[in-house]
Amino acid sequence: MKKNNRKKIAALVIMVFMLAIVAGCGGGAADNGDKAGDKTETINVGLNVELSGGVASYGTNARDGALLAIEQINAEGGVLGMQLKPIVRDCKSIADEAMSVSAALVNEKIVAQIGPLTSGNVAGSTPIMMENHIPLIAPAATAVNVTVDEKTGKTNEYIFRVCFIDPFQGTLMAQFAAENMEAKTAVIYGDNSSDYAKGLAQYFEKTFVEKGGKILATEGYVKDDRDFRATLTKIKGMNPDFIYVPGYYQEIAPLIKQARELGITAPMGGGDGWDSPDMVSVAGNEALNNTYFTNHYSSEDKDPNVVQFVEAYQAKYNKDPDGFAALGYDSVKIMVLGLEEAGEADPGKLAAALSNITDFVGITGNMSIDEQHNPVKAGVIIEFKDGKQVMNTRIQP
Amino acid sequence: MQKNNKAIRFGLDVLILAALFTLVQYLITTGLLNQYYQINLTSMCINIILAVSLNLINGFTGQLSLGHAGFMAMGAYASVIMTQMWDQPFILGLLAACVVAGLGGFIIGVPTLRLKGDYLAIATLALGEIIRVTLQNIDYVNGPAGILGITKMTTWPWLFGATVFTIVVVVNLINSSYGRAIISVREDEVASELMGVNTTKYKVIAFVIGAMFAGLAGAMYAHFFYIIKPETFNFLKSFDILVMVVLGGLGSTTGAIIAAIFITILTAALQSFPAIRMILYALILIIVMVYRPQGLMGNKELSRRTFGRIWGGQK
Amino acid sequence: MLELIQQIVNGLSLGAIYALIALGYTMVYGIIKLINFAHGDIMMVGGFVGFFSLTLLGTNILVAMLVAMLVCAILGVLIEKIAYRPLRTSTRIAALITAIGVSLFLEYTTIFALGPAQKIFPDSAFPLKAYDIAGLSILNKDVFVVVSAVVLMLVLQYIIKWTKTGKAMRAVSLDQEAAVLMGISVDKTISVTFAIGSALAAAAGVMYGVYYSTVNPLMGIIPGLKAFVAAVLGGIGIVPGAMVGGFVIGLLETMVSGYGNSLYRDAVAFGVLILILLIKPTGLFGKDTGEKV
């Protein structure tokens, strides 16, 4: 009896000590950052990305693109005479973790944060960034309310992005389907578990109907689904002129493959979530013929900037870059431009400089940041031809 | 004599709690506790509420419920609708959370608590997922996008109050006749039924109360972390809470509290090693179950008697 | 009419995969009354082993499947020895929690070792051929999956009904203590059960990889859950029940997507589960044995 209680008290005491130690460590991780890198010699850049959990593959690729950019910039002498120091943390694809990570990064005296990837997780970080007056550059968060507060209509002062917003992509594809493809009827079959896909679908429908088209049906799948044949068989029966499939490549690739296997020959379209080399590996060249997607850039683009990026990425990581990698890369580069224009590694000045950027030449397009902190840049419609991404049209907003 | 002792002990409890509250409040107001620590403190309190409430169902009543995150979701959404969309004060939001989650617990509990052991576990897992998928398809709450821009209403006083409230209610419940009935259901349901205990009634009571507090935790969560989406409340979240309860000891409230604190700290410490963290959780589950199924505290509680023995010398 | 038949074809191949996984669940439950939560993840491991067999060792699809089955059989036996055997006398809750732990362990160790991204099955493993029969699209993949599943199920039936091991398995699941008295090594029989169940899951994993062209570390969760529902539907512990249950769930899911609303596809499986548990928990083929005090 005595021994049991003693053991329990001992356990409790040990736990309290551990608490103290780890608490010291947790905060200390911040201190280490300060001591290791002299503040005057490095510019700390926080990378708050999803490296585990549901969208781990997007976060991992964006991080890789960003790190490549940082490496290249440091090799060329850094920014404002200082080297960039990336601090990478995983927000586990959860919004509350994103908040916690941002708070930890703020302790590390970052000048800006890159990421997270999804709109929800960016929202998680937002309060911390706003309270601490540190800019956040979102590589791929596309929801309108990421940069604009829905309740007040004001732009969030410290939140920026380098990607399209949902309305743009959906509208673009609807325009393309109605005008270039001359489609009168369409079916939407999108990722129902993704706010990104739902946003795209919403705007596609709006524009398509405005242009006189008719939406025959709206079907959905969810993330991690791999079997689409039942719904595709149903869609085949409807015989639409165009099928809009907004979502991410993990599901889209098998979906398109199965559609072609079932004998569906209609043109299919989607958004930038399609952009990945996996599309070709999984679906195959033939299945992808007559499919189109809206994108920021094309990895087959002959533009020297893009070519340089693709080659450097392949050399460093031994894999092909996807859209997220490119956006991660551009996020860093636009931050660097902002720093140069600000003249100092001060977060507040950086934010001001970023709002005024008018001619950033990124690999995902030439962009200017508008009043809602969204990039004004051209969108391209990419067509898959024999497994190659071919630019079909470029549309300037 | 005894009455005096009781009064003294109660007074001491209140004093300790008040001291703890004031200390932390001081640290927060002066900024000694920076944002990072505040976030972790909030997570800690929310986890304590979740662990203690799940322990009531899994530990004390012996019913394995794997859908606790579903009740958290109900509470979170109910409170957000109340405060953000209908512009009501926070207290009404919390009330709404408890009521809705409790109701959910009742509706889900009555049919499923007829099931035993493994079947109940799977059914609750499935129901937790159904709640999540349903929320994903309701446009009023923006489906998968969730609701963002939630005003920060969860402050330390609220957190402290909610946590203490939860612990006090659960401990008092267990030490009452209701509690004894609940424990008898865990020990031997058939014997308990034979002794005239309405086992279904007590199972549902435990389930509903557990669900209510999960809803409270959900409301606290929503009003601190700015955004909620259906995805946040998936079965991984339910497992997270399960790990805390198992580690602490199924059937010990103190164990649940200690384990919740420990796991929160562990999560923060392993922020840079997420895959390892999950592997560690898995190993914790396996190792605890194989080598020490009673967890850290078994079903013993840390009580004043224990402290008394240490400070007052062994008897 | 054509569409209906096409949907049936879709449902059958989906059902075949579910059936194979369901068999493992049902066999393990039948023998030690444990829901092996980690079963879906064994399917995932099988898929990955098949992937590596195809890409690293360059074998053909059948050999890859056999390799996967072998590896997972061993894995299943190991898991049983390390995690489940010590808990044979513990409460069911304890065993279930351990199973959850094993499941998480398999998933996250795979993510840790191989990264979270999906791996793509080479097309050369199973070159596609579509048979256009009167407007129906039947792929050689469909045929492969259904035929292999049926063959494996027939083999399993043979083992259970006509071999000594099978007899031992049936005996242990009926009455463990009596089986010991009859000289049956319970430990060995349980190990064999796990081995066979895991091998079947591995085959399902490879088929999944062939059919959907990709494998990823979390791919076992949802099919595992649905296969479990299938096993319960057929009557958990009853082998033919699992086979029937698998095909029924596959067809049901396909019909709901095809004729109802695709958004409710996952809800179907869960809904069936709840209904079964409330109405007839012993399943289609199960007998109500009542509770002995």
Image: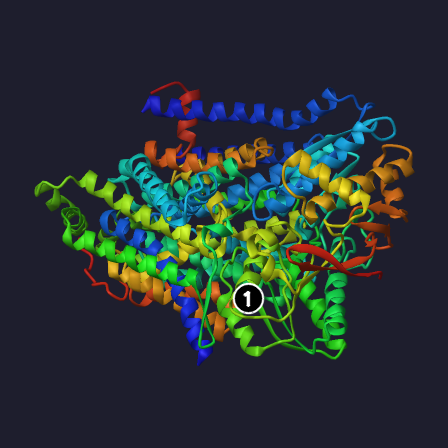
**Which image quarter is the N terminus of chain C in?**
bottom left
The residue that label 1 is drawn on is: A259
Q: Is residue B25 above or below residue A187?
A: above
Q: Is residue A208 above or below residue A29?
A: below
Of residues C129 and A162, the one drawn nearer to the viewer in this rendering: C129
Q: Is residue B129 above or below residue A355?
A: below
**Residue drawn where x is 40% and y is 60% of the image:** B109
Q: Amino acid at mark 1?
A: Ala
Residue A347 in sight here: yes
Quarter of the figure with residue A165: bottom right
In the displayed structure image, the side of residue A318 where residue B282 appears, left or right? left
In the displayed structure image, the side of residue C199 where residue A161 appears, left or right? right
Describe the colour scheme in one phrase.
rainbow
Residue A243 image point, x, y percent: 63, 70
- Count of labels in the image: 1
| Element marked by disc 1 | helix
Circle 1 chain: A
Residue B114 in sight here: no
Residue B292 image point, x, y percent: 34, 32
Residue A223 image point, x, y percent: 55, 56
Classify 10 Å Cα crowding around label 1: few (below 14), some (14-19), many (20 and above).
many
Query: Which residue extends farthest top?
Result: B313
